[in-house]
Amino acid sequence: MGKELRLMKGNEAFAEAVIRDGADGYFGYPITPQSEVMEYLMVEKPYEKTGMVVLQAESEVAAINMLYGGAGCGKKVLTSSSSPGMSLMHEGISYLAGSELPCIIMDAMRGGPGLGTIQPGQADYFQVTKGGGHGDYRLIVLAPASVQEMYDFVEISFDLAFKYRNPVIVLTDGAIGQMMEKVYIGEQKVRLTEEEIKEKYPWATLGKTPDRERNIITSLDLDPYRHERHNIKLQKKYKEIEKNEVRYEELNCDDADYIIVAYGTSARISQKAMDIAREKGIKVGIFRPISLWPFPKKALRQLSERVKGILAVEMSAGQMVEDIRMHSVETTPVEHYGRMGGVIPTPNEIVDIIENTFVKS
Amino acid sequence: MTEEIIIAGFGGQGVLSMGKILAYSGIMQDQEVSWMPSYGPEMRGGTANVTVIISDERISSPILTHFDTAIILNQQSMDKFEESVKPGGLLIYDPNGISNPPSRKDINIYKVEASKEAAAMGFRKIFNMIVLGGYLKVKPIVILENVIKGLKKSLPERYHHLIPDNERAITKGMEIVEAVQTA
């Protein structure tokens, strides 16, 4: 590949990608299991190399509003947090979405609700794909399943964020954040100058020029009809994203009798389950949504027509399974297997469920 | 080839770094690797463990419940992980502090008197590398040359002067590892 090869934690790979992609600012507040992101940035000191700002805010609420300010100026900004911190940020995320501001928010999910635990979880699916904050808005949500994807998804997320002027969530969990794998590191990109930002993003509030009206970035409009027009525009944009930005991976689905639908850490564990099941002669495949919103509904629907059963595996009481049920044909049974509170499902448990609920019945 | 390993002991025994060195050694010979630590409350003063997978193929789950090899460095970890070795698998342990030695009959068991040897060498901290040497003697999944390359990659440069000591410790481990039982 010709690229530099390293052994890194998911959190570190994410932080390195942020520097390499030429981000302008990271604003965050530490919380397990993603504190290595800021720790890594503070050690690497990108502010001495690329001029990127790294700032520990006084709280998650402050951090997300710093993103609002930075993104309003057309800067590439991001934050990272974990479930309880994300809850604090969702007011700000609604404002970012309403004001159409590009940014990345990484959520290394842990078991909830409340302070919960610091072990991995996947129970923030509803929160990031269905809302979280108030109002009719959507977030692009990408779910990496390897350390390499933790790296690669930073560039993809910034590109999507600016293409659609929309916040992007990188939805991961404690396991992917903490584990180390091989990562291929890309070239260092140069940060945009203010002149380049003005040229590329004419909406950015970088000072009024005589040839145009003031740029205003706000989510407030007291004229309901004008505000409805803004909402219609947003909905049109979301439709466009649903059409263009669906991402998923299929493993051994071609000859599969049963498929497991899982993302992130659950998808990795399910791969092992698939291997064990195939050794036993049960043809299992994996459908891994990579974009959780937009959800890969068309591909799943087509697949659901050909298989005898679908098992959703999530570290939650069953959240993505609702989307799976909605987008599968009614004649194919959809079951759910989940562990909660920071417990990670094991490959053998998953194989047992497939045998007992589908194969034997 | 896929080797699934758990290394478990007290925090501070160098459990995580043993795993890291193994993972780096795997990279040095162009293999796929994953390193999954226990994190959080367990690590704060209690037991620490890490799952390392080295494979010629894409690695599926980084989190496992059964292992080809368990490297056990304290009694708590013996109690927890002896049962998780696959039948026919390998268990390596340092008898120092082990009051209940492993009792399974269907696995291969080896011991390395690493703590004792490290004390005799006057360098107690290097005990984990002696254990690692014992393991690599029984299962040469990575060659010594690649371990040294891996050490160079994983250690900050200010510690590179310690690499010869590490090499000596690995070699010592290879000499003193003893079979307790072969299944």
Image: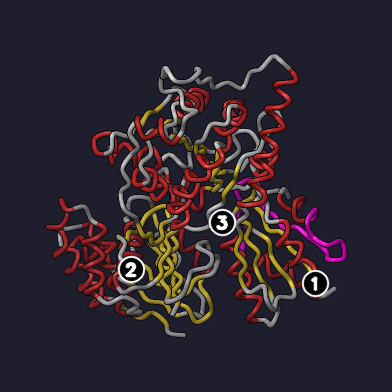
Q: What residue is shown with label 1?
A: A308
Image coordinates of residue A82 in percent, x first then y, are: 53, 38
Residue B149 in which image quadrant: bottom left
The chain letter for the residue carrying disc 1 is: A
Q: Which portion, as a residue range, is magenta? A: A325-346
For image coordinates 40% across by 42% down, the residue present is A36
Q: Tag 2's secondary structure?
A: helix
For image coordinates 30% across by 65% down, the residue present is A2
The colour style of the image is secondary structure
Amino acid type of the residue that numbered disc 3 sits on in the rendered structure:
Thr
The chain letter for the residue carrying disc 2 is: B
Front disc: 1 or 2: 1
The correct choice, above or below, for A21 with respect to B94 in the image is above
Amino acid type of the residue that numbered disc 2 sits on in the rendered structure:
Ile
The correct choice, above or below, for A163 with respect to A253 in the image is above
Q: What residue is shown with label 2?
A: B27
Q: Disc 3 vs disc 1: Cβ atoms closer than 8 Å?
A: no
Please name whichever residue, B12 or A329, is drawn nearer the observer in this view of the structure. A329
Q: Residues within 10 Å of mark 1 (few under 14, many from 20)?
A: some
* Residue A265 numbered mark, or none: 3
* Residue B173 numbered mark, or none: none
Residue B32 in which image quadrant: bottom left
For image coordinates 32% across by 59% down, the residue present is A6
Q: Is any part of residue A134 visible from this angle? A: no
Q: Tag 1's secondary structure?
A: loop
CA separation in Å, label 1 and label 2: 40 Å
CA separation in Å, label 3 and label 1: 25 Å
Front disc: 3 or 1: 1
